[in-house]
Image: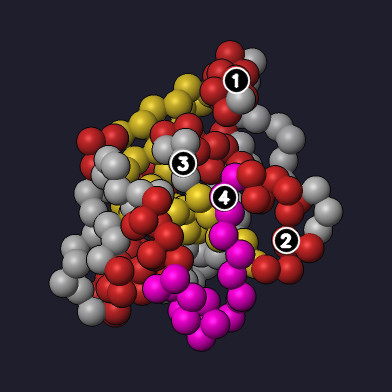
C-alpha cells in the first residue's frame, strides 16, 4: 500500500524521491531512526525502507476507536508522556526493539514543523543509545518543500532523504544533542535549499 501511495506522488505530483546513505541502515537488528518531521511523506518513506518499523504514541491515543486498531496492527508502542515517565519506559521498549529486531522512528522535535522552523530537540534518542546500545541513524530530509505541513498541495520537485552513519556512542548528552542538531536540523536545512 505504501508503495502505491508513493508511486502516486511520484507520478501525479511529479515528486522524485532520492534516498542517500541506504548503506548506513542496520540490517536484521533493532535501531532508532531519528528523523525530521515535516509531512506525512517522511514517515511513509521510512516505512517503505523498513516495513517492520514501529513508533511511539501517547497512551491516550489508544483509547480512540479505530485508531487503536490501526496502532495495534502497525505495532505502535504506547507510552506515558512526560520526560521522566517516557525515560522510565526506555529499557522496556528497547528490549522489544532488540528482541524483535525492529527499528523505531523518533521525531526528535516532537511534532511536525514547517520549512525553516526549528524546535528544541528531545533527548529520547540519546537515552535509547546510552541505555540499550541501539544505533541511532539520523534521517535528514527536505520533505516539507514538496509536501508542506497542513497543506493538501503537493509541489513538484526532488524529495531527498539522507541517512547518516550511526551516531557516535561515546558522547555525553550535551555533545550527542549538539551532533544530532548538526546532522538533523542543519543538514535538513541544507537539503531544503
Q: Residue at x 46, y 79 (%)?
A: 87
Q: Relative to the observer, which residue lies in front, 148 or 29?
A: 29
Please tell me which of labels 4 and 3 falls first in the chain. 3
Q: Residues within 10 Å of mark 3 (few under 14, many from 20)?
A: some
Q: Residues within 10 Å of mark 2 (few under 14, many from 20)?
A: some
Q: Is residue 40 left or right of residue 141?
A: right
Q: Is residue 191 above or below residue 154?
A: below
**Is residue 156 in view from this perspective?**
no
Please tell me which of labels 4 and 1 falls first in the chain. 1
Label 2, label 1: how far apart the Cα atoms are = 27 Å
Residue linked to disc 3: 52
Please tell me which of labels 3 and 1 falls first in the chain. 1
Is there a contact, CB below 8 Å, between mark 4 and mark 1?
no
Q: Residue at x 40, y 51 (%)?
A: 100
Disc assigned to residue 75: 4
Q: What is the magenta range?
A: 74-92
Amino acid at each position: 500500500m505504501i508503495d502505491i501511495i508513493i508511486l502516486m506522488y511520484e507520478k501525479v505530483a511529479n515528486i522524485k524521491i532520492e534516498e542517500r546513505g541506504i548503506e548506513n541502515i542496520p540490517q536484521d537488528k533493532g535501531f532508532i531512526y531519528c528523523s525530521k518531521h515535516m509531512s506525512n511523506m517522511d514517515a511513509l518513506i521510512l516505512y517503505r525502507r523498513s516495513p517492520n518499523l514501529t513508533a511511539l504514541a501517547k497512551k491516550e491515543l489508544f483509547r480512540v476507536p479505530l485508531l487503536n486498531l490501526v496502532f495495534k496492527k502497525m505495532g505502535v508502542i504506547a507510552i506515558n508522556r512526560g520526560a521522566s515517565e517516557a525515560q522510565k519506559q526506555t529499557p522496556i521498549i528497547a528490549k522489544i526493539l532488540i528482541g524483535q529486531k525492529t527499528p523505531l522512528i523518533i521525531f526528535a522535535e516532537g511534532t511536525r514543523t514547517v520549512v525553516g522552523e526549528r524546535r528544541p530537540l528531545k533527548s529520547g534518542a540519546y537515552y535509547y543509545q546510552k541505555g540499550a546500545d541501539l544505533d541511532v541513524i539520523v534521517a535528514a530530509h527536505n520533505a516539507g518543500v514538496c509536501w508542506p505541513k497542513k497543506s493538501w498541495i503537493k509541489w513538484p520537485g526532488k524529495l531527498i532523504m539522507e541517512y547518516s552513519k550511526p551516531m557516535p556512542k561515546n558522547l555525553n548528552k550535551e555533545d550527542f544533542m549538539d551532533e544530532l542538531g548538526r546532522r538533523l536540523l542543519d543538514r535538513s536545512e541544507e537539503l531544503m535549499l
